[in-house]
Amino acid sequence: MSIRGRGSRGRTYFADDTYPLPVRGGTNNLFATYQDNLTSDAQASNITTTLLQVNAIPIASTNDVLEITFTACCENPGNGPSATFTLNVDGVPQAGGCQASMIILNTEVPKQNVSITRRITGLSPGAHNITISWVGLGAVIFVVSEPDRQHATLLIKQLRS
C-alpha cells in the first residue's frame, strides 16, 4: 500500500510499508497510553460534572508531552438539549480550543458528535489528572442502550524524549 500526496511547496511525498518516512522534527517517543470509556448511560445537567477521567499520569520532566483526544456522540431526547464539554488538567479548564459544544434544536437530527484534541506540554514533574467535564440541558449519551451508535472516549498518549 502506498500513500501519495502533494505538499504545500509542490513536493510529492511517498510512503509504503517497506520504507516508512520519518516524522520531521519529532524527538518524542510513545511512552504510554491511557484510556477511559463511558460505561453507563449519562445525562447532562445544569451542574458541571466529570464525565471521563484519567488520574495520576506520571510526568518525569517538562519535556513529556500529552496528546489528548476526546470524542463523544450525544442524543437529543426532546427539544432543545445542549451540552458543553471541557478538557481539564489538574482541575483547571484548558483554554485555546479545549471546549466543545453541541446544540440540538429539534428531534429531526437527534445525534451529534463532539471532539476535542489537544497537545499539552510543559507540565511539571509529578502525577497529573486529566478530566472531561460536561454541563448542559438534558443531552444524553446512551452507551448501554445504544452501544453501536453512541460513545464517549478519552484517549491520552504520553510521549517522552
Image (cartoon, rainbow, N blue to C red):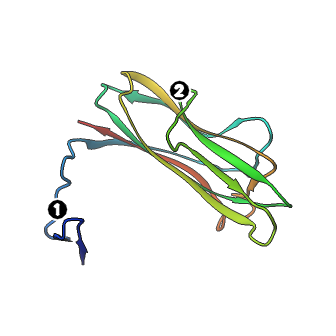
Kindly identify which residue carries mark 2.
Answer: 90
Residue furthest out toward the bottom: 1
**Left/right of residue 120 with respect to residue 64 in the rendered view:** right
Amino acid on which the number 1 mark rests in the picture: Leu
Among the 4 quarters of the image, the one containing residue 93: top right
Amino acid on which the number 2 mark rests in the picture: Asp
Could you tell me residue 17's position as x and y percent? 20, 70
Residue furthest out toward the left: 19
**Left/right of residue 74 with respect to residue 31 in the rendered view:** right
Residue 69 can be seen, yes or no? no
**Left/right of residue 83 with respect to residue 114 in the rendered view:** right
Kindly identify which residue carries mark 1.
Answer: 21
Residue 131 can be seen, yes or no? yes
Contact? badges 1 and 2 (CB < 8 Å) = no
Q: CA distance from mark 1 to mark 2?
A: 36 Å
Look at 63% across and 45% down and name the residue there. 85
Lower sequence index among marks 1 and 2: 1
Could you tell me residue 132's position as x and y percent? 59, 40
Q: Quadrant of the C terminus?
A: top left
Look at 49% across and 40% down and name the residue there. 96
Q: Secondary structure at mark 1?
A: loop
* Circle 1 crowding by C-alpha within 10 Å: few under 14, some 14–19, many from 20: few
Q: Is residue 23 above or below residue 59?
A: below
Could you tell me residue 25's position as x and y percent? 19, 47
Could you tell me residue 147's position as x and y percent? 67, 63
Look at 47% across and 27% down and name the residue there. 128
Q: Is residue 134 above or below residue 129?
A: below
Q: Quadrant of the N terminus?
A: bottom left
